[in-house]
Structures are given as C-alpha cells and as structure tokens.
Image (tube, helix red, strand yellow):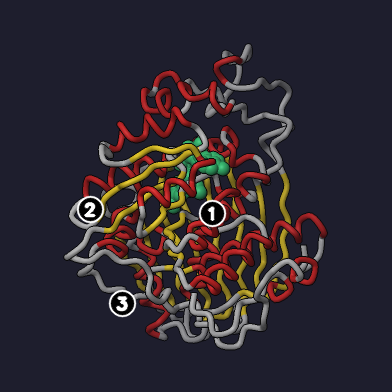
Amino acid sequence: MKRRKFIGNTTKAVVASTVLPLNSMAKNSVKASAEQKLRVVLVGTGSRGSETWGKSLLKGYSKWVEMVGLCDINHKRVEYAKKYMGAENAKTYEAKDFDLMISETKPDVVIVTTTDHFHVDYIVRAMELGVDVISEKPIATEVEQCQRILDTEFKTGRKVTVGFNMRFMNMSPEIKRVLDSGELGKIISVDFQEYLDLDHGSSYFRRWHGKIKYSGSLLVHKASHHFDLVNWYLGADPVEVQAMGKVAYYGKNHSFRSRNCRSCPFTDKCNMYWDITKSERMMDLYVKCEDVDGYFRDGCVWDNDIDTYDVTTTQVVYDNGTFLTYTQNTNLAYEGQYICFTGEKGRMDVRLYNRQPWEEPAPIEIRISKDTKTTKIYTIDNDKGNHGGADKKVKDLIFDPEKKDNLRQRAGSRAGVMASLIGIAARQSIETGEKVEIKDLVEFPTTWQG
Ligand SMILES: NC(=O)c1ccc[n+]([C@@H]2O[C@H](COP(=O)([O-])OP(=O)(O)OC[C@H]3O[C@@H](n4cnc5c(N)ncnc54)[C@H](O)[C@@H]3O)[C@@H](O)[C@H]2O)c1
C-alpha cells in the first residue's frame, strides 16, 4: 500500500516542491463559452448521473452544454437514462466501448458518475484520449488510483474538476469567510461530527456503498466531502491520520437476513424493510435493469458481507499544526452535523439540523464566542433544491461563463486526492492500528498544477 511499493509502476514520481496550495483553482479547467457549447459525455447513468449531471444539466444549462454521449456498464440503464434526461442527441454506449464513444462523439469533457471504485478508469482514460474530466467525489478509493490520476494529469496536461458540491452549501462560504477574516485567530482544532439518521444511514448499507471494494468505505465515499471542506477551510494539507472504526450496527449485527427486501421472508418483523416497488423511478432505474448486472438496489442491510464501517472516529494533524477530530455515525435518531472551530481568539460552533424528532429549529445555526462572557448567534437558511441548492451552484460555476470563482470553490484533482487520501489513510489505520503519514502514500509531480 505504501508509496515505495508502487512507485516502480508509475511514470512520474518526483518530489512535490512546486505544487499549488489547496486553495488554488485547477488551472485551465474546462469552462463553457458564450460562443460554443461544450460537448459533454457522461459515464455512469445511475441516480446521480441521470439526474444532477443529466436531466437537470440539460434543463438548466443547454445554453452552454450539449450531451452527446452516454455510457454505462448496464445497457438497459443507459437507455432508460437517455429517455429520462431527454438527451435526444446523445448516442448510447456500453462501458466496454468507452474509447469508441470518445472517438465518435468527440467530447470536450467527460462527466464521471460511476460507482466510486471505477472513477479512476474513466478519469485516466479520458485524459489519455485528450479530454478534460468532471468527476463526482470521491475522485479515487485507493492510493494507487490517486497516483495514477495525478501522473496522468501531469503527463497529458488535461484537467480534472471534482464535484465537491458541499463547498457550495450556504454554510460553507460563511464558515470560510469567518475563518479567513481572522476573527477567531489561528485555528487550533476542529471537531466535525457527522450524524446520519436511520433512514439515510441505512440507505448506504442497502447499496454498493456497504462494500469497501466499491465505495472505499464511508470514510472515502461520504467523508471525502467533509475532509475536503476542512482542507479547504484551513487552506492546509493533512499530514498524519489515525482512526478507529467498525461495523457495529448493520451487516452481521442481526439475527436474520436475506438477499434483498423483495425476496425477504422477514419483512413483517424487519425495521429496515424498504419497498422499492413504491417508486417508479427506482423500479425503472434499477429493478428493470437487474437482469443485466445482478445489482439489487434494495439489498439487505444485514448482509454478512457488509464491511463498510458504520461508526468511525478519525484524527488528522495538518501541516499548520491544526488537529481535526472527525466522527461519523450512521444509525442515529436524527440527521445533521455539528462542527466546531477552536481558535486562539475564539470559537465557532456550527449546527446543521436536517431531520429530527423535535420541533424544527432554523436549519443552520452559527455561534461565535470570543471569551467566557461574549457570544453571538445567527442563522443561515439553506437554499431550495438538492443538497441545499449546492447541486445547482456547483454547475453554475462550472458551466456559466459569467461566474467567477472568487472563493476558490472549484476543486481540482489535488483537492480530490487530498480528501480521498485522508479516508484511505483512516481505513489503513483502522486495519493496521497504526498512524498513517500522507507523505508515504503519493507523490505530487513537480511543476504540476492540479
Ligand atoms: N456529490 C454528491 O452529493 C453525490 C450524491 C450522490 C452520489 N454521488 C456520487 O455519484 C456517483 C454515482 O452514485 P449514484 O448514487 O448515482 O450510484 P448508482 O449506483 O445509482 O449509479 C452508478 C452507475 O454506475 C454504473 N457503473 C458501475 N460500474 C461501472 C463501470 N465499471 N463502468 C461504467 N459504469 C459503471 C452503474 O451501472 C450505475 O448506473 C458516485 O461516485 C457517488 O459517490 C455524489
């Protein structure tokens, strides 16, 4: 797993000395222009691909974007997605014909929204074929994948943008503004608690996310959002990671199980029973395509093979000395986040309430306390739309030629890799019981600007 083991296989592995800091934007990233529409192809036409980067993209951004190709490992899903998106001009391809899609449709950009573990294959191949990439998070689930992406970007001069939409939720620029203002002084420590309720939390264990070989665990799949935010907030690089985690609630932790909810003899007594047949979209997107790939979207959350930890605690030391303590729970009675920044001159507490069994307070509450007597509290609303309006804003910045990136919200491969590496390092630490140093994992090519 360590850098030395795979260095021999990489073409460029030289010490990082002139890489841009995390807050830099990926240079020459793909951008639409008023004169010419971007030709876009999409690989991975599942839920996220067909909606956020499919139907909504065509609805809101057709002025700048044209969908010319769609590709998936499942030929039924790609045909359904084409209709669902209303992408009449897009040719459809099976995953094995990715290269053919690129040569026939001649895209400016490939959008990658496959299962996490396979992002790398398309990111790398697209760049090798001379095309820029927009990838969903996490950019990669393994150390070797991170290195391949960095090396290919350096070699080809193409660019990767990572869809870290959480940078665009209203609270994120506000947190960044407060931290950058210096009001709290130097940040000494960050506590970040991620709360997933039973409904949302269990949804990961019904799907491919419950298997580390597909998702890299929720420390990569989910927490890469949060690690990226902290990296971006602090403008610092992680150097050391230590973690604990286990499967404490889902998977083996139950007395009965089945293959999936529809085939289950225990539906009457299972508190996790979920009837996928009630959703037309779920039926069309997954159930009607099951015979092609054998993927059950209503998989059993008690599956013995689930190895994605459902409770984790991770500690990160940054190169500026800041400590991060990050915890993730997936079977709570309520949903949200509690994030605290302790600085030399004060403390900021950020509480995000998403769903809870009590009267709903304002969605996002920010408290700034300067000493033991002085505190101020204010609230921010989420915007309407998916992920508190963030899914729209990330596309606005990428595709609208008028939008300026004043806050450096557009993330490149370096930010993507750093976020993934914390999760991967945490996984390694859980498996070995040892502290992991980020510098032992990948090397950033010299003079590369990711
Ligand atoms: N930023 C966000 O808020 C957010 C939200 C949801 C999902 N995502 C990301 O979007 C991506 C897709 O998630 P989803 O919920 O749509 O999952 P999904 O299971 O609905 O879709 C994944 C698609 O990839 C296809 N696929 C799997 N392996 C493939 C391969 N080797 N080659 C080509 N296609 C392949 C599947 O057939 C499926 O159509 C994931 O990377 C996920 O992390 C991001």
Alpha-carbon distance for marks 1 and 3?
A: 28 Å
Question: Tag 1's secondary structure?
Answer: strand
Pick the residue in front: 101 or 47: 101
Please indicate, yes or no, whether residue 426 appears anywhere in the rendered image: yes
Looking at the image, tell me whether mark 1 or mark 3 is earlier in sequence order.
1
Residue at point 56%, 67% (across, down): 152
Q: Which label lies toward us, 1 or 2? A: 2
Residue type at the position of mark 2: Tyr
Q: What numbered label is drawn on residue 194?
A: 1
CB atoms of marks 1 and 3 within 8 Å: no
Which residue, given by chain and number where applicable, does mark 2 sit on? 61
**Where is 30 relative to 55, above or below?**
below
Pick the residue in front: 128 or 135: 128
Question: Tag 3's secondary structure?
Answer: loop
Pick the residue in front: 157 or 100: 100
**Where is 114 relative to 34, above or below?**
above
**Image quadrant where one finds the N terminus:** bottom right
In the rendering, at what x and y percent does residue 124 appear? 54, 59
Tell me: 432 left or right of 127: right
